[in-house]
């Protein structure tokens, strides 16, 4: 080990800078951190001070100990001046046990294996519509195709009628483009308030009705809580969308793997797992220590923020053979791109079904998929993947 190898890489201070994730190579920093400083302290600047965890075992252990590592003050890094996440304690992602368990039970039925199996035809139809539209367009941005597709699926689960999906998609995109919360978009919020009142008056077989009528600790959720949870669900599908786009990009960069999948469709479930590992589209989760503790020999104080870098865990050389190789037949593949423990992604079964449907449709309906322009990457430290992926379908 040379002194040069041990010296921290020059961009280490910028690990949480969205520009580094859009234009730089965070994997080079994560690789160095795993090797030389797996529990690494970043001092306060615009962001509060935080610890970076980069090894698989440490990240998994933190996820599985919500008593010591709380989600209630926020699960994403935010500028220090903004304080804790105002949704703390109110949404599923930002709750700790025991409240988290009750809130999750309200929603779990809608994302179970059984529920997703019941949705498979709808998802297949949505995938077919999306790919046909792409074929008609010739050259188009795959980001838009994946967005419309995943948005229409979650909209259906929430209980939004199909005729309104297009409006909802447009408003959500506008809110994301303006980097504001969905709650800041007046049309979107008006729409949800109306839907809420309609379901209060007459419950239907949908997730909004379940939220409107369900109780936590014996109390109905407030309107604010219901809206925040709907926003959370729509926002969380961004991870699924980025995994779809990143998955297609992975195949475009590894055409041998696309041919292999085409020749042996039994590889599809494993291919989906490899896409989820490879893309690791949720870049980090944050937790706040509730008491002093030790992580890999490093003392962490109560109130300290701990950031779990998922793409790093999923490239950990101690866990994955040849981790920088995209291999749709990788086995075992125990990635933690969907987290672990209490907060394990509630949409995981749905995300997998969407991937199977869309890639099957692309294999069945196209003879060639080509890049038709340059790829840019999302400017964010919270999610990662292509921001534009122009393609041509034939
Ligand atoms: C491949 C795609 C996806 C990835 C990589 C992903 C990743 C994750 C991760 C890492 C977490 C844990 C966050 C934390 O606790 O800090 C999570 C939770 C969550 N995900 Fe996903 N997700 C994906 C797709 C989806 C989809 C399609 C939905 C739509 C319903 C969704 C909804 C949620 C929700 C509501 C939570 C909070 C669960 C809880 O706190 O109990 N996710 N996801």
Image (tube, rainbow, N blue to C red):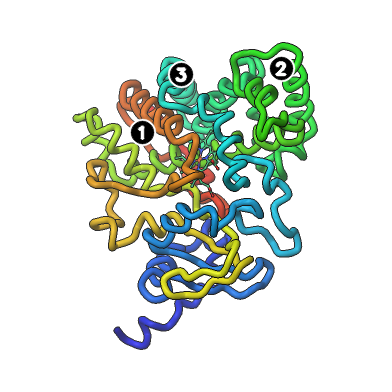
**Mark 2, secondary structure of its residue:** helix
Label 2 within 8 A of ligand 1 by Cβ: no
- Label 2 environment density (alpha carbons within 10 Å; few <14, some 14–19, many ≥20): many
Q: Earlier in the sequence, mark 2 or mark 3?
A: 3
User: Please, what secondary structure does the residue beneath circle 3 have?
Assistant: helix
Q: Which residue is mark 3?
A: 119
Residue 51's place in the image compared with 191, above or below, is: below
Q: How many numbered circles are shown?
A: 3
Determine whether, in the image, residue 72 is placed left or right of residue 391: right
Tell me the residue that label 2 is attached to.
199
Q: CA distance from mark 1 to mark 3?
A: 27 Å
Residue 389 appears at what percent x and percent y? Answer: 47, 41
Residue at 57% x, 73% y is: 42
Dot 1 alpha-carbon crowd within 10 angstroms: few under 14, some 14 to 19, many 20 or more:
some
> Callout 3: 10 Å neighbours few (<14), some, many (20+)?
some
- Residues 285 and 141: in front is 285
Q: Quadrant of the N terminus?
A: bottom left
The percent position of residue 33, horizontal first and vertical second, equals 42, 71
Q: Which residue is mark 1?
A: 369
At 50% across and 53% down in the image, what residue appears? 283
Q: Quadrant of the C terminus?
A: top left
């Amino acid at each position: 080990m040379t002194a040069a190898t041990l010296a921290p890489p020059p961009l280490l201070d910028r690990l949480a800078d969205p520009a580094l994730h859009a234009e730089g190579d965070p994997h080079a920093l994560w690789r160095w951190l795993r090797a030389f400083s797996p529990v690494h302290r970043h001092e306060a600047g615009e962001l509060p001070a935080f610890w970076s965890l980069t090894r698989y075992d440490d990240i998994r252990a933190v996820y599985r100990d919500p008593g010591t590592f709380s989600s209630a003050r926020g699960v994403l890094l935010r500028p220090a001046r903004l304080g804790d996440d105002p949704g703390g304690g109110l949404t599923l992602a930002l709750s700790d046990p025991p409240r988290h368990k009750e809130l999750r039970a309200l929603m779990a039925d809608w994302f179970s294996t059984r529920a997703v199996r019941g949705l498979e035809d709808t998802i297949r139809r949505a995938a077919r519509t999306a790919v046909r539209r792409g074929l008609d367009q010739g050259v188009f941005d795959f980001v838009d195709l994946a967005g419309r597709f995943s948005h229409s699926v979650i909209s259906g689960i929430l209980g939004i009628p199909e005729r309104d999906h297009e409006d909802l998609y447009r408003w959500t995109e506008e809110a994301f483009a303006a980097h504001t919360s969905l709650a800041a978009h007046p049309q979107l919020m008006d729409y949800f308030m109306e839907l809420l009142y309609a379901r209060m008056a007459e419950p239907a077989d949908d997730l909004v009705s379940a939220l409107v009528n369900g109780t936590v600790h014996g109390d109905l959720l407030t309107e604010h809580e219901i809206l925040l949870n709907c926003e959370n669900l729509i926002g969380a599908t961004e991870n699924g969308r980025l995994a779809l786009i990143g998955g297609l990009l992975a195949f475009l960069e590894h055409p041998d793997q696309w041919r292999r999948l085409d020749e042996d469709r039994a590889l599809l479930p494993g291919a989906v797992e490899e896409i989820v590992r490879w893309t690791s589209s949720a870049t980090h989760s944050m937790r706040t220590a509730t008491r002093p503790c030790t992580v890999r020999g490093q003392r962490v104080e109560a109130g300290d923020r701990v950031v779990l870098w998922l793409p790093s865990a999923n490239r950990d050389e101690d866990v994955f053979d040849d981790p920088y190789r995209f291999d749709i037949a990788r086995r075992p593949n125990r990635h933690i791109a969907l987290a672990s423990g209490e907060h394990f992604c509630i949409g995981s079964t749905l995300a997998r079904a969407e991937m199977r449907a869309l890639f099957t449709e692309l294999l069945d309906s196209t003879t060639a998929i080509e890049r038709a322009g340059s790829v840019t990457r999302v400017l964010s430290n919270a999610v990662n993947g292509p921001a534009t992926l122009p393609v041509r379908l034939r």
